[in-house]
Structures are given as C-alpha cells and as structure tokens.
Image (cartoon, coloured by chain):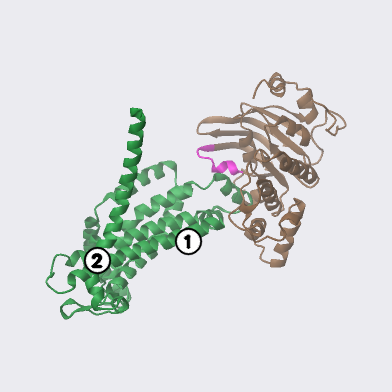
Chain colours: A brown, B green
Amino acid sequence: MYSLSSIETKETQNIIFPTTQPHIQIKDLNVHIEGKHILKNINLSIPNNSITSIIGPSGCGKTTLLKTLNRLVDDTKGVDVTGSVLVNGEDIYGKHAEVTHIRKKMGLLSQKPFPLPMSIFDNVAYGPRIHGERDKKILKGIVETQLRNVGLWEEVKDRLDASATRLSIGQQQRLCLARGLAVKPEIILGDESTSALDPISTQTIENLLVELKKDYTIVLVTHILRQARRVSDYIIFVYNGEIVEFGKTEDVLLHPKNEITQQYVKGFIT
Amino acid sequence: MNLRLIKDSIVRNLSAILLFASLAVVLLIVLGLGSKSIPLLQTEKLGNILTESIWSPLKGNFGFLPFIMGTVWVTFISLIIAVPLCILASVYLVEYASDRLRNLVLPLMNVLAAIPPVLYGVWGILFVVPGISQFVAPLFGVHTTGYSVFAGGIVLAVMIFPIMISIMVEVLLTIPQELKAASLSLGATKWETIQKVILKKAKPGIIAATVLGVSRAFGETVAVLMVCGNIPKVPQSIFDAGYPIPALIANNFGEMMSIPLYDSALMFAALLLFVIIFGFNLLSRIILNRLEEKA
C-alpha cells in the first residue's frame, strides 16, 4: 500500500477546514449538460494555501467541477448551472458577476500547454496588457519575475522574441504557468496539467506547485493517484457527479470511509 | 508473374499516366497560348504592350493596360468588400452562432456557390447597377450609368463569399478550444480573444481562403462583363467603367478575326490571365510557407 513518508502529516484528522474564510466555497452546485446531470448537489469549501486534488474515474465530472470554478464551463454547449460558487465570498454565478474579473483571479493550467500564437515575452505580457498595463518597463519586470518564478528565465532570456511554440513541451507548460501567474491570480487551477509531460518536466511542475501553495490556493484535477499523493494536502473523490469523499490526503487514500473510494484507491474502478 | 501483381502494376502505371496527362494539358495550354501570341509579340515589345493604354485594333494599337487595370480594380474592390465581411461572418458562425444556425447556414453557402454566374450578372444589372447610379454615386456627386468597376466588385464579392466563408469556417473550427480557454482564463473578453489569439492563429488559413477567392475573382467572366461597362479605358475611380481581361476575351473571341493580329492579341490576353493567376498563387504559396514556418 501507500507509504506515508512523503506526506507531511497534519495535526489532527478531524480538522479539515481552516478557520479563515476559504477562497472557494461551493454551495448546492448542480450542473446539467444537454440534459445530463453532470454534477449533483456539490457542497464544498476548498482550504486556502494548500493543494486540493480532485480525483475520480474518467467521465465522473471532475474536469467539469474544475471548470465551474472559473466559469469556463459557460463555453460548453447546452450547459445549465444552478447553485453558487463563492470566491472570496462573492458569488461568481451571481447576477452582477463579471466573468473576466473572476477568471483573472484564477490561473488555469490545462492538460496540454497551449501557448498563445505569439512570442515568449508576449505570452507572459498578454494578461497584464489585457488588463491595461502599457508601461514597457513594468511589463518587462513582470515577464522576468514570472519566468524566474517558474524557473524558465535562464533558459529563455536570450530569445524572448522567439515564438513560444518553439519551446519544448515541458518549457511550454511552465510558460503557461508563468502566463497565468502574471495576472496575479489568487487561485491556480490545474486540469491534469502534467499528463502530456515527460517525468522530469512533471516533477518540475509538481515542485513548482508545492512551492507556490504558500501564496496561492491550488486545485488540481488528476487521474494519477500517485501524483495526488505526492503533491496534495486534501483530496476530493468524485464519482458519478457526486462528492463521495473529501478529506486530508492520507485519510482519503489510506483510510477511505466509503466503499467506492476504497475500490477506486485500490484500482478496481478506473 | 502472378495475375494479381500484374493488375497491381497496371493500375499504378495507368494512374501515373493519367496524372501526367492532366498536367500535360496545362503545359499544352501555355504552349498553345504562347505560340499564338508570338505574332503580336513580334510586332511590338512586351513592355509596350503591357503599359500602353490605347486599344484600337483597327489601327493596330494593342495596349493592354486598360484590361490589366480593369481586372485589378474589380478584383481589389471585391476583396475590400469580401474579406472583412467573410472574416466577421465566419467568426460569428464559429464563435457565437448556435450549432443549429451553423448547420443551416453552411449548406446554404454551398447553394450560393452553385448558382450560375449569369444569374449573379442579372442580379447585378437589376439591382446593383441602378443602385449605384441612383443612390451611391449621387452621394459623391458623381454621374454614372452604374455600369462600373464598383458594380463588378460588388457582384464579384458576393460571388466569392461562399467559398471564402466555408474555408474560413473550416479554419476557425480547427483552433483548439483550449487555446481560447487559455486566453479567456487570463480575463480576456471573447472579442479580445478573437482579435488577439483566434485570428492570429487563423491567419495562414484566412490568407489561403483569400487567395482562393482572388483566383476565382481574377477569372470570373460572365457576371463581371454584364455589369462592368466594358470600355477599354483605364478606370480612374470606382464609378468608372472597366474592362477586365476575361471579359475582353469572351466578348471578342470569334469576331473580327479578319483584323490582323487581333486573334493573336486575344491569345496574349489569355496568356496574361494565366500568368497573373499562376504568379499570384505561387506568391501566396510562398507567403503561406513563411507564415507557417514562423508559427
């Protein structure tokens, strides 16, 4: 079974929620896509400054759950969302919620890196520019800081004007992370962000995320249990659109309370 | 040898022969046109023929500038109208319209593409030409019959809509959802995403669609000659009549062949059209390759 050595053990097993107001709170969330009930009565508070992984078999709704957090789910055809998602206490599905403002607060790291069709520099500067930053010095500063943050600066500092698609896929994913960090988000969302990467790049990204959690609240979707175990503090197990279990990593993976979770963790359900 | 293998090699060789036969046709056209144009080229210098603007076959003046400029004006006007409209229309179809609307409109585009050019010509004479002479030209204080390069450009623009829109839609559909999501998740609006990411990514495809549109526009004959006025003078404004090369050939071929060199001049016109279209396609291929390398 799993060894606990790599997991930093938290004090008591009963305390799941931090005392401060959580960045993300989900209340009675239901999502239908073209009549299908994809997410059912989700109620959840995601702990701040930690990594929470959403796990579950494919098609269980874990990616949809992630996408409801920054309303990217809006772009799905025939989608209907009820309930609320509070980000810093503000309902992002409320009447007055402004989508661009919400998304700015969340950096998204997708499955495969999708660099924008422009130079390395412009990729990172894209977000700040969109939000009105014109000062070249400031932009330069942001680009350098964020590229250093993801450990890419030394590798690309001499070719910032080169097309971003020329980078290796691991470098591209780090660039995408830097691009997301450049708009100063509070939350980082990762959708199987390492599934297209080689082991070394995967490790780089994982280490980065662990390092970043002191400043950000991080939510990852992953289908790799070992990755969930390596990086996350909390785990949400989703099955058939419902949250079956939510708790500290070691609790969910080693002592699952629910039978379906047990089966999934043991590898009987994939 | 095994019969099956013999069959196999027959099919392979036959296909190759047929391929080269079809390529040979192109070569034959060029050779045919070239040899027929020689009499004209022997009497006057190529440079003069291309830059002279006097066309009076009876006096032996064969200046092709009016026709070249007629073609250029009509094509250019049609592009100015068609390219922005087609880009916006296809962006709307892909990014905003519902699946139902898209599935309704795209087949309709194919119907538009299947309408014979002569019908577009009739439509031009009935609506576009009077529209220009009665409403548009007076706005600019110009008197015109309406038969003008502008009318030709409008009719041509409408004719190249379907092919350009359907190609642009195909191109836009290939842009991954995740790339759009990347831009949106940074807080960009949909319009910012379209301008800065989608259209940028789609640029080579949009250029390719435009090239196909232009190639069609260069060669389009009947519809244009019905509304263009066909006066062999270099147009000075969009309200002037023009005389594109295909119209010249179609209007005059088979007539007045007794005039010396006339036959040869028309063949030269055809060769010119061929060279222009060929050169244009070659050039755009080079540009596209550059763009793809860069991306």
The quadrant of the rendering that contains the N terminus of chain B is top left
- Chain letter behind tag 1: B
As drawn, is B53 to the left or to the right of B105? left
Q: Earlier in the sequence, mark 1 or mark 2?
A: 2
Q: Position of residue B131 (x, y in %)?
A: 26, 66
Camera-nearest residue between A26 and B109: B109
Q: Residues within 10 Å of mark 1 (few under 14, many from 20)?
A: some
Looking at the picture, does residue A253 appear above or below residue B291?
Answer: above
Amino acid, disc 2: Ser
As drawn, is B218 to the left or to the right of B249? right
In magenta stretch: residue A93: no
Question: Most extreme residue toward the right, as rendered?
Answer: A11
- Chain letter behind tag 2: B
The quadrant of the rendering that contains the C terminus of chain B is bottom right
Instruction: In the rendered structure, find residue B35 and report the number of the disc placed on it.
Output: 2
> Are dots 1 and 2 in contact, CB under 8 Å?
no
Looking at the picture, does residue A125 appear above or below residue B244?
Answer: above
Residue depicted at x 48% and y 56%:
B204
Amino acid, disc 1: Ile
Per the rendered image, the range of residues in magenta is A71-79
Q: Secondary structure at mark 2?
A: helix
In magenta stretch: residue A76: yes
Q: Secondary structure at mark 1?
A: helix
Question: Most extreme residue toward the top, as rendered?
Answer: A259
Q: Is residue B131 visible?
A: no
Camera-nearest residue between B280 and A140: B280
As drawn, is B295 to the left or to the right of A158? left
Q: Position of residue B192 (x, y in %)?
A: 56, 56
Residue depicted at x 21% and y 57%:
B118
Q: Is residue B3 visible?
A: yes
Instruction: In the rendered structure, find residue B287 and report the number of the disc placed on it.
Output: 1
Q: Count how many numbered circles sit on residues in the image.
A: 2
